[in-house]
Image: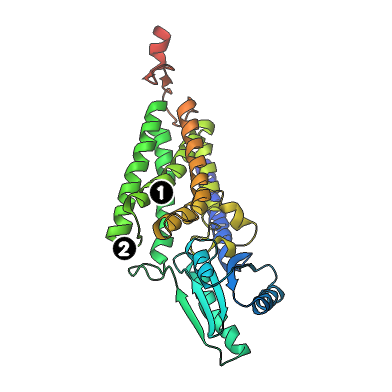
Amino acid sequence: MSKLSTAARVAVAVSLVVCLQVLLLLVFAWSASRSAPHALPIAAAGPTQQVQALVGGVAAQQPGAFDVTVVADDAAARSAVTSREVYGAIVLGQSGVTVYTASVASGAVAQALSQGIPAAVHAADPQVPVTVTDLVPSPADDPHGAGLSIAFLPLAITSLAAGAVIALLARGRLQRLVALLGYAVAAGLLCVAVLQPGLGVLTGDVVANAAVLGLVSLAVAAATCGLAVLLGPGGIGLSVLVIFFLGMPFSGVTSAWQLVPTPWGAWAQLLPLGAANTAVRSVAFFGSAGAGGALAVLGVWAAGGLLLAGLLRGQPLRHGGAQPTEVADEGELVSPGAVAGS
């Protein structure tokens, strides 16, 4: 009977793993295979009639694909790209067409614009010259942006693990808070050391980059720890489900969230990894332009997690043996026997 019971438990465990595998494949592969622009912001400048014709043509050929903002001139178009208001810009001039991109914001979008716009212009008039200028290119050591995109994966996994470990091992509320803040500082410093001087994946101010990477680490770890304190072991699972399973494939870290199926891409920007993608790129490459909303999202997740971890006594997280009891005033721990005997 015990052998049968063990075999049944193994079968259930394997079945759950297979179901999880199918879910992961479905979510990650579906979001990637259904990639298409949805209200992707771009700018256009030039003579009024030509720009209106361009906007109308784009809307007719790909309804809802692009959100075209008409700007005054070439300088305004460049500014819109470098301030992260748009992913790219098209300037119609007397001497030809100029396409501005920012490959570090999204290599996929930059490639689509730099190839698609010239092809469309030349199809209409092969004699019109088209110039493509990458205003904010990817670093020389990471020309395709793959290094930064993949960096969010280990950052997410290790921060989830850190939050779970702290919830399991920290003895009291004060220890949780100190451990979470210490992890965030260490993660920010070490990650920027690897990604910036080490690999050349990041540029910009080292201190600012370390700060935003530390905030990303804190947001994920604190949320995981806080949910574990609130809900017990199930809180860790909930954190992994929301932050990783839902957050990672729809975050847009490998493309742009406007290329992710709607409404998942927009919703993912309210999760730590979606906000992390925007915040890190804005701080590292655009002088923090466009980072405000993403930093606010990360701050809310970090603050919420810290509040849960610091204010709640917590659910039992370890099996076997008596659970320690906190002393409310000092955050110290004493055994239940000592409390009973006092």
Q: Tell me if label 2 and label 1 are in contact, CB under 8 Å.
A: no
For the question of whether residue 170 can be seen, the reply is no
Q: Quadrant of residue 179?
A: top left
Query: Would residue 218 be found to the left or right of residue 91 on screen?
Result: left
Judge left or right: residue 143 versus residue 44: left
Q: Position of residue 40 (x, y in %)?
A: 60, 65
Q: Mark 2 points at which residue?
A: 200
Q: Mark 1 points at which residue?
A: 212
Horizontal and vertical percent for residue 61? 69, 77
The image position of residue 327, as x and y in percent, is 41, 17
Specify the quadrant that holds the C terminus.
top left
The mark that comes first in sequence, 2 or 1, is 2
Q: Which residue is drawn at 49% across and 71% down?
A: 101
Q: As drawn, which residue projects farthest toward the left? A: 198
Residue at 29% x, 53% y: name it. Answer: 193
Task: Report whether residue 167 is seen.
Answer: yes
SS for dot 2: loop
